[in-house]
Amino acid sequence: MTFNNETILVVDDAADTLSFINDTLEQAGMDVLVALEGKQALMIASQIRPDMILLDAMMPQMDGFATCQALKADPKLADIPVIFMTGLSQTEDIIRGLEVGGVDYLTKPIEPAELLARMRVHLDNAKRAAQAQTALDATGQQLVTVNRLGRITWATTQAQASLTSILDDATTLNAFAAQLIAWQAQNPHIGSSFNWPECDLSFDYQGLTNQGDMLLRVEDKSQEQGAPKLRQRLAGITERESEVLYWLANGKTNREIALILSVSPRTVNKHLEMLFPKLGVENRTAAAAIALKILAY
């Protein structure tokens, strides 16, 4: 069984377990990161994105279930496969681990050969999913999947860019999830839409994935009117320049704008270089101020 220097985050409050798993994974050719509790794991994952997380279910303060929920609520980390490791073997505990986003469940004591075999399967699945996401990103579509808990489980890069500044804290994420759950309870048909009242985003239902998650296409209704409005009111700017200016006014960075418009950050920068003289300004802040004034009326 071969591994290609994948980075694995192991989260467990038991030093003996950490040492045993660390040795097993390193001998198999993997790079290992360790965390002793949930909050530390979230911090590490956000800074050094691992290929997989092995997560103890029972830990003090923030347990594995809560940690996994937090991971799956972050679009940037949601597609990292999580395997639970625990001494709990009751059916309800296993179901709970899967419901919060785990892909597998191993009961302690861990048997090395079984651990590595299961890891290989899920790492391969994650790799195929990443390849599929790359293909979808190339089409420029904004797509997300959400589970029955209202949590985003996957998103194309463009969709992540659109959602990051909106779902930017736990309170907003929980409110978003509650609205989605209520909408799902209505058993929507394919083609129906969920509108998030806090913004102008619309989520159009495309069907179910093999995992039972809902596939939604994200549409920014404000952009449909915003960019054309800027082009109409600002003589001499091109359609693409109006789109760049619209997203600039919405607080997006060059990189985020590039992802949304499926162009390179360098191209976005060139559009801005052309825009500034046309608007009679010298920087992003002044350009955004002009656009915001127009969009407000």
Image: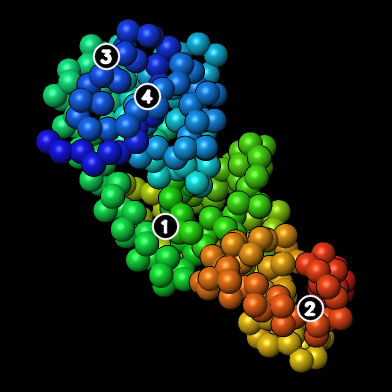
* Screen quadrant of the C terminus: bottom right
Q: Which residue is mark 3?
A: 20
Disc 1 element = strand
Disc 3 element = helix
Q: Which residue is mark 4?
A: 10
The mark nearer the N terminus, 4 or 3, is 4
**Residue 64: quadrant of the picture:** top left
Percent across and percent down for residue 134 are 37, 62
Percent across and percent down for residue 157 are 48, 59
Q: Count up the numbered dots.
A: 4
Q: Residue at x 81, y 69 (%)?
A: 283
The mark nearer the N terminus, 2 or 1, is 1
Q: Residue at x 86, y 81 (%)?
A: 280
Residue 201 left/right relative to 41:
right
Q: Residue at x 47, y 37 (%)?
A: 48
Disc 4 element = strand
